[in-house]
Image (cartoon, rainbow, N blue to C red):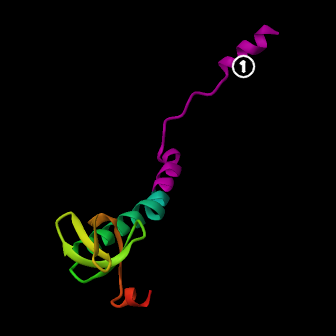
Amino acid sequence: MLDFFVSSAWAAPAQQEPSLASFLPLIVLFAVFYFLLIRPQLKQAKQHKLLVSELTKGDEVATSGGLLGKIKEVGDNFVAIEIAKDTEVKVQKQAITTVLPKGTLKTL
């Protein structure tokens, strides 16, 4: 009975060398992640950077915190936004998510 187990252990096949076929699923998975996750995120970040760099005085904007207002002053890192008559707040440029069409604040 013991001879049976010993002989089957000696009969085990040797391990094969890694080939391109063994790495193919990993390569396909990386390609799917790149085109479905990484590339769209990089494109969106590029668009947001362009939006922030083109901010000018008088633009009507919405922030990530939900504030709506008109830009009164543009600095290097901060923007002064008038959210009501004689009420200004300073927010970081990166917090601005959308530039609204002119006249949007009058309709709200």
Residue 14's x, y, as percent? 58, 27
Is residue 55 visible in the rendered structure shown here?
Answer: no
Q: Amino acid at mark 1?
A: Ser
Question: Residue 8, how many percent across, how many down?
Answer: 72, 19
Residue 5, located in which quarter of the rendered image? top right
Magenta stretch encompasses residue 4: yes
19 lies left or right of 54: right
Q: Is residue 93 visible?
A: yes
What secondary structure characterizes most of the magenta part?
A: helix
The magenta region covers: 1-30
The residue that disc 1 covers is: 8
Name the secondary structure under disc 1: helix
Q: Residue furthest top?
A: 2
* Residue 41 image offset from top left, x and y in percent: 40, 64
Vertical placement of residue 33 versus 21, above or below: below
Residue 53 figure quarter: bottom left
